[in-house]
Amino acid sequence: MKAILFKIPKNDEGSIKLEEDKEPYFYGFLHYHPEIQITLILKGEGEFIIGGKRGRFKPGNLFIIGQNDPHVFLSDKIYYENNNKISHSISVFFNQYIFDRLFYDFKELQILGKFSVDFSKGIIIESTMGEIQFTFRKMFTASPLTKFQLFILLLELLNEHREKRMLNPNAEIIKSSETGDKKLSAVYEYILENFNENPSLDEAAKTAHMSTPSFCRYIKKRTRKTFTGLVNDLRIGEAQKLLSRNDRTISEIGFEVGFNNLTNFNRKFKKITGKTPGEYRAS
């Protein structure tokens, strides 16, 4: 799955861009863009990939995606097969640099500046009922000035939310470049196409056009993970998707995502998710 540089249409109305997606299934290609993205899932279920993290999404989930962070929301297979199903999300896009001065020059907004530092790590809020959803939706019918005020209020509500969780809490803040992100996207593509077999460190380095030692340093800097750690994260993400269905045993799923024994699969799964595969399936 290759990440595509996605161009957000220019917005003549102001410094933030609103977008509503309401289709049978979401845009299914790994992509990235220089804008920060905040997305609220209103309808639809499936799996997400954001940076090096993989997991499930459902209605009520809200995601903050950092600039140039490869991501995709993959609707479940049933949404491609049943035209009566709807996937619905609303998003806001904005450039970090536009707001940096605003956040730091005005004392009242400095707390939002501190919050924005974490955007590069990716953020998920599992449940967003009430004021967050109301404020987000109201932006779509507001005048430009009111829309901007609502956007600041939305950031304040998200900052104050007690159940927000960083997807990549140990990620460094790294200045992105299109060239660098194309390299990382090529690595994701290689792993996603081969994780159920045995992805090769040397082959992955070749996809990024780097020597193996340089590649190891690059992956560690970009993801705060070793290559093996990144592979395991993506494998466990796929296992979470398969465990949400009941058509295969835990052992079968472990082998399908690339683990050659059940003990190793159980250990890695619990290390990454905090639960055993059996506990995850039962929850």
Image: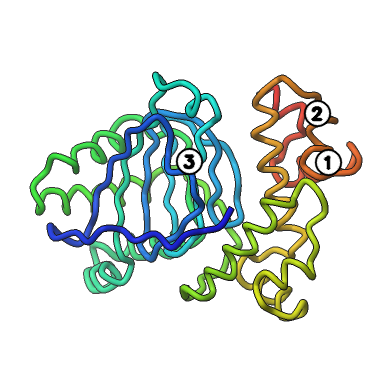
Q: Are marks 2 and 1 in contact (CB under 8 Å)?
A: yes
The residue carrying mark 1 is 265
Q: In this view, does 239 lie to the left or right of 73?
A: right
* Disc 3 residue type (three-letter): Glu
Residue 143 screen position, x and y as percent = 8, 47
Q: Do the residues labelled 3 and 2 touch (CB within 8 Å)?
A: no
User: Which residue is pictured at 11% across the width and 43% down the height?
Assistant: 142
Above or below: residue 58 compared with residue 199: above
Q: Does dot 1 land on a helix, a strand or a loop?
A: helix
In the depicted view, which residue is nearer to us: 159 or 28?
28
CA–CA distance in space, label 3 to label 2? 30 Å
The residue carrying mark 3 is 163
Earlier-in-chain disc, 3 versus 2: 3
* Disc 1 residue type (three-letter): Phe
CA–CA distance in space, label 3 to label 1? 28 Å
The residue carrying mark 2 is 250
Residue 129 screen position, x and y as percent = 35, 30
User: Which residue is pictured at 72% across the width and 46% down the height?
Assistant: 235
Instruction: Report the quarter where the C terminus lies.
Output: top right
